[in-house]
Amino acid sequence: MTERLVSCVSCPKRSSCFNELDRADHRFIEENRVELHFSKGEVICKQGSFASNIMFIYSGVVKVYLETDSKEHIILSVMPSGKMVGLPSLFTDRVFPYSAAAVEDSVICSVDIRIFEDFTKSNGGFASEIIHSLNDCTLHFFNRFVSVTSKQVNGRMADALLHLSEKVYVSREFIMPLSRAELSALTAMSPESVTRVLNKLAEDGVIGMNGKLCSILDIDRLKKISQAG
DNA sequence: CCATTAATTTAGT
DNA sequence: ACTAAATTAATGG
């Protein structure tokens, strides 16, 4: 747990914003980060707690979700390695506006948020990359907004599957990391509808489901379903 | 069209 | 074996 996988200087997976920093900066960050290992299901950050750090997903997959008054959560995003959790807390009230949990065993590189704020102010290149990340994030949420507000269950499920296939796993085949309940929290439909819609897609030969292995068999049909809404 | 309810089956520890 | 999760079918807003 205390072992470091790599140093920041040579980290092959570090976020692009760190490419704008020099060797001394990397050494400085090295002194101010910790590596954390989370098992599937473990909470990485809790909504409402102090946002004292930015969490970089070194490996694994993480869900970011809102805790609502009801027992059901709302999943905002499912994020692959290479992404950062906590950027919306930069220069704001220092409290996490959402929770995050591992949906696969994950390694997180946690960096003091003040370092991010300092580099953002002092280094234009670093700031550009942070803005780039934040823009990717808002664009993603435009798509999510359209999906959840304007599409019917088939379209919403198609969007979820396309995101997992194209953005998270970059593969036509992947082990579905989300439970039916989590898929329902992601697509804003009942868990019963999740099974019904997935069965329909499998019946129609658009996807294949063998246990937890999910295969996209007909990506064109899936994209059509996404567009048709 | 889809959530809800309830009954039943399956999976995970 | 026991509990939680998933599936299936029926009902109704």
Image: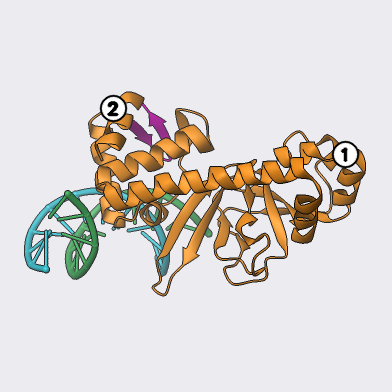
Chain colours: A orange, B green, C cyan
Circle 2 is placed at which residue position? A221
- Which of the 4 quarters of the picture holds residue A72? bottom left
- Secondary structure type for disc 1: loop
Q: Could you tell me residue A141's position as x and y percent?
A: 46, 49
Between C2 and A182, the one nearer to me in the picture: A182
Q: Could you tell me residue A164's position as x and y percent?
A: 46, 39
Circle 1 is placed at which residue position? A22
Give the magenta-colored segment's residue range: A206-218
Q: Nearer the viewer, mark 1 or mark 2?
A: 1
Q: Is residue A54 magenta?
A: no
Q: Could you tell me residue A156's position as x and y percent?
A: 32, 45
Q: Amino acid at mark 2?
A: Arg
Q: What's the residue at 85%, 50% (across, down)?
A: A29
Dominant SS of magenta comes to: strand
Q: Amino acid at mark 1?
A: Asp
Q: Is residue A106 above or below residue B7?
A: above
Residue A203 placement, left or right of C4: left
- Which of the 4 quarters of the picture holds residue A214? top left
Co-location on one chain, circles 1 and 2? yes
CA–CA distance between discs 1 and 2? 47 Å
Q: Could you tell me residue A45's position as x and y percent?
A: 62, 63
Residue A203 in view of the camera: yes
Q: Is residue A210 magenta?
A: yes
Between A60 and C10, the one nearer to me in the picture: A60
Residue A79 in view of the camera: no
